Image (tube, rainbow, N blue to C red):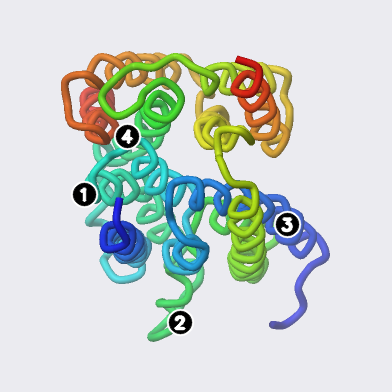
Amino acid sequence: MPHVSRRTLRDALSVALTVGAYGVAFGAAGVAAGFTVLQTSLFSLLAFTGASQFAAVGVVASGGAVVSAVVTAALLSTRNALYSLQMAPQLEVRGWRRLLAAQITIDESTNVALAQSPQGPDAVRHGFWLTGSGVFLFWNIFTLVGALGAKSLGNPAAWGLDAAVPAAFLGLLWPRLHDARVRIVAVIATLFSLIMTPILPSGTPIIATVLVAVVAGWR
Amino acid sequence: MNSLMTWSVLLGTSALCYSIKLVGYLIPARWLANNRLQRINSLVPVVLLSALVVAQALTVKTHIVLDHRMAGVGAALAALIAKAPFPLVVFSAALTSALVYRLR
């Protein structure tokens, strides 16, 4: 990789390390939900998109069906399709490299890459590959650490792991509540899923809230 | 949930999430250049994350259950309002929830 600017390297590394460290929380959540250490680690290697991974194991933990877990996780990752659309023309990747670029197209790699645009197209590309591969490395290492740690702890509730997962979701939601309209949508979705909980099968109230997004985003 | 089901969740989620990431590299940009679609898509994480907080903190299967987890998420909310970093948010939730669980 030809000359990477210090700023790009610093941005990429700091994001990769801090975000990667949250992998501990996912590793613990996976094991607490009943996945093995191997399965939890494979989740981070293969799915590699944080919120969706938490969602999949979270739905399983709360007694949802396989389909509910998979559909919720997939819906939560649809923004990655828009990221890949934004990145594709800037990365100018061809052939098999597209397969690699796709796997590391996530919130962090896209946002760090786009933040480098004042420094030119090379910095955007460096930001994307460095952040994406850095997060991938640390996220997977810390997932394994968290999974092994949770396995040795035993009862997840006694260590607060069952509250750590919804807290992580709240932490992921918080920065998105930047304007009043979005906050209203979040409150309606919260009430809607509470009302639907005793009515619909376990796990499906989560998917059903997409209706709220469709109605609110229609006009 | 048995091992066939956990493997199905793992492999199904991985395959779908990867396919979704690949979309932008394979299709022409104009296919998704629809304002309504983009607006709805930007709200999808907001509604799903809200519903996931509810499902994980306030329910057990199809029942609403208020227990130690709610105390934990309350602590997380306080940490977020105090602008705490993400790891501290998660840690304060776990600590509070574990304390309530053990003391009750």
Tell whether A12 sits left or right of A93: right
Q: To which residue does mark 4 refer?
A: B39
Contact check, label 3 and label 4, Cβ < 8 Å: no
Figure check: B11 above or below A159: below
Quarter of the rendering occupied by the N terminus of chain A:
bottom right
Q: Position of residue B39 (x, y in %)?
A: 32, 34
N-terminal of the two: label 1 or label 2?
1
Given contact means CB atoms under 8 Å apart, are the residues at marks 3 and 1 in contact? Answer: no
In the rendering, at what x and y percent does residue A19 appear?
65, 51
Disc 4, SS: helix
Q: Are marks 2 and 4 in contact (CB under 8 Å)?
A: no
Instruction: Identify residue type, mark 3.
Output: Leu
Residue name at image x 64 percent, y 68 percent: A137
Q: Both on one chain, marks 2 and 4?
A: no
Instruction: Give the number of the disc on residue A67.
Output: 1
- Dot 2 alpha-carbon crowd within 10 angstroms: few under 14, some 14 to 19, many 20 or more: few
Q: Label 2 amino acid?
A: Arg
Crowding at label 1, few (<14), some or many (≥20) Cα neighbours within 10 Å?
some
Q: Mark 1 falls on what kind of element? A: helix
Q: CA distance from mark 3 to mark 2?
A: 24 Å
Residue B3 placement, left or right of A115: left
Circle 4: residue type: Arg
Chain of the residue under label 1: A
The residues bearing labels 3 and 4 have C-alpha atoms spaced at a distance of 31 Å
Residue A17 — which label?
3
Q: Which mark is residue A97?
A: 2
Q: Comparing marks 3 and 2, which lies closer to the viewer?
A: 3
Name the amino acid type tagged 1: Val
Chain bearing tag 4 is B
Residue at position x 64%, y 54% in the image = A152
